[in-house]
């Protein structure tokens, strides 16, 4: 089965991101495919490179990057959600005259078209996060 | 097979569960997860309502979220089926579409 | 073609940005997929006439929903009980909606391939 996943809540706003991560790992372990994980609304903050929680909480952030690196899962932050919340990726940051590359490793920024694309390719679609 | 409803809020915090139960259809499944697992307590506000709903839908709860919240099996309403994350994945395969109630 | 159903249960000016929810609907419509929107519970307050946001940080919702009509969004539905419980009349909303009874919601939800909780 192919899954498309949407995450609507920020890392410490709700448990949604954690549940989505655990679901994704379980699905992959069972041999299913994650077409894309799309971060929308406050979910955009999952890709923020500069979060600096206490050391014992850092692995929670890094696990998204690890999921992308180990399993090739496509982690996409919606470009409009990102801009609205001040999260910019390198070329956008340069284009807008700002200096930052705010994206954590393994994430990319793209439009809602990729979200629709994932929904069309997938057999199942789930939304996580309040 | 019916719809999978995901409820992630406790019944005292949010009306999500009651609003979900008002709209479920026969053959649907309701998965309680995150704070939603508090609804499985025998003492929960909606325990009678949840018990009644089991005549038409199957109610599941995510075991990891119960454990995280210190809810032991003896505290849970009879008839609630526990699943792990792989069980959650399987539920999402058996049911479509999947609707999240926040 | 897949059937997308957007479920709106939050009132205006709270929770997720309405504009971002509508952006999703319009993008799906632009991909020639079927788009339906269901207003339930406090979500029906999005349709209440006479909303006058009093400061510039609150964006009015009426123009956003009017824009949906230009994007081939197939239909807006509201649950009759949600409207009645909140003193709203389905014939006096900011955009036309079709109403469904609570007992019809389960069947309506089941016709969707993809349900997006907004």
Image (spheres, coloured by chain):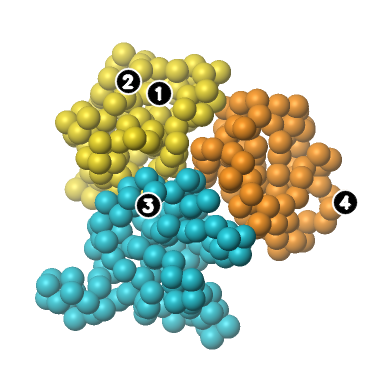
Task: Tell me the CA gap for discs 4 and 3.
Answer: 42 Å
- What mark, if any, has residue B74 been given in the picture? 4
Chain given the colour yellow: C
For label 2, the residue is C97
| Chain under disc 2 | C
Chain given the colour orange: B
Chain given the colour cyan: A
Q: Residues within 10 Å of mark 1 (few under 14, many from 20)?
A: many
Residues at marks 1 and 3 touching, judged by CB atoms closer than 8 Å: no
For label 1, the residue is C78
Residues at marks 2 and 1 touching, judged by CB atoms closer than 8 Å: yes
Quarter of the view holding residue C118: top left
Regarding residue C67, the answer to whether it shows in the image is yes
Question: Could you say where residue B81 lies in the image, as x and y percent from the top left?
Answer: 76, 45
Mark 2 on the same chain as mark 4: no
Task: Tell me the CA gap for discs 2 and 4.
Answer: 47 Å
Helix, strand, or loop for circle 3? helix
Question: Could you say where residue A97 lies in the image, as x and y percent from the top left?
Answer: 12, 76
């Amino acid at each position: 089965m192919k899954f498309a996943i949407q995450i609507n809540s920020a890392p410490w706003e709700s448990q949604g991101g954690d549940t989505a991560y655990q679901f994704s790992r379980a699905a992959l372990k069972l041999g299913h495919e994650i077409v894309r994980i799309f971060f929308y609304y406050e979910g955009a903050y999952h890709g923020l490179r500069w979060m600096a929680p206490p050391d014992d909480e850092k692995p929670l952030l890094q696990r998204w990057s690890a999921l992308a690196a180990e399993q090739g899962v496509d982690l996409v932050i919606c470009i409009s959600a990102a801009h609205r919340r001040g999260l910019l990726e390198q070329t956008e940051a340069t284009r807008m005259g700002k200096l930052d590359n705010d994206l954590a490793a393994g994430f990319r920024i793209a439009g809602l078209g990729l979200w629709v694309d994932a929904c069309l390719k997938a057999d199942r679609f789930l939304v996580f996060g309040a | 097979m019916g719809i999978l409803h995901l409820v992630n809020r406790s019944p005292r915090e949010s009306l999500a569960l009651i609003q979900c139960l008002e709209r479920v259809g026969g053959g649907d499944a309701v998965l309680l997860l995150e704070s939603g697992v508090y609804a499985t307590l025998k003492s929960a506000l909606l325990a009678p309502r949840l018990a009644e709903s089991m005549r038409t839908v199957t109610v599941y709860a995510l075991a990891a979220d119960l454990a995280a919240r210190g809810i032991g099996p003896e505290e849970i309403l009879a008839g609630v089926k526990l699943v792990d994350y792989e069980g959650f994945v399987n539920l999402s395969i058996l049911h479509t579409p999947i609707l999240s109630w926040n | 073609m897949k059937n997308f159903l957007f479920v709106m249960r939050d009132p205006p000016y709270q929770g997720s940005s309405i504009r971002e929810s509508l952006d999703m609907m319009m993008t799906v419509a632009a991909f020639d997929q079927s788009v339906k929107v269901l207003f339930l519970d406090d979500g029906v307050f999005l349709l209440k006439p006479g909303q006058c946001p009093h400061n510039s940080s609150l964006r009015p919702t009426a123009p956003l929903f009017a824009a949906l009509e230009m994007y081939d969004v197939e239909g807006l539905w509201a649950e009759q009980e949600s409207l009645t419980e909140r003193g709203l009349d389905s014939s006096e909303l900011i955009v036309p909606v079709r109403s469904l009874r609570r007992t019809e919601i389960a069947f309506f939800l089941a016709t969707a391939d993809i349900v997006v909780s907004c």
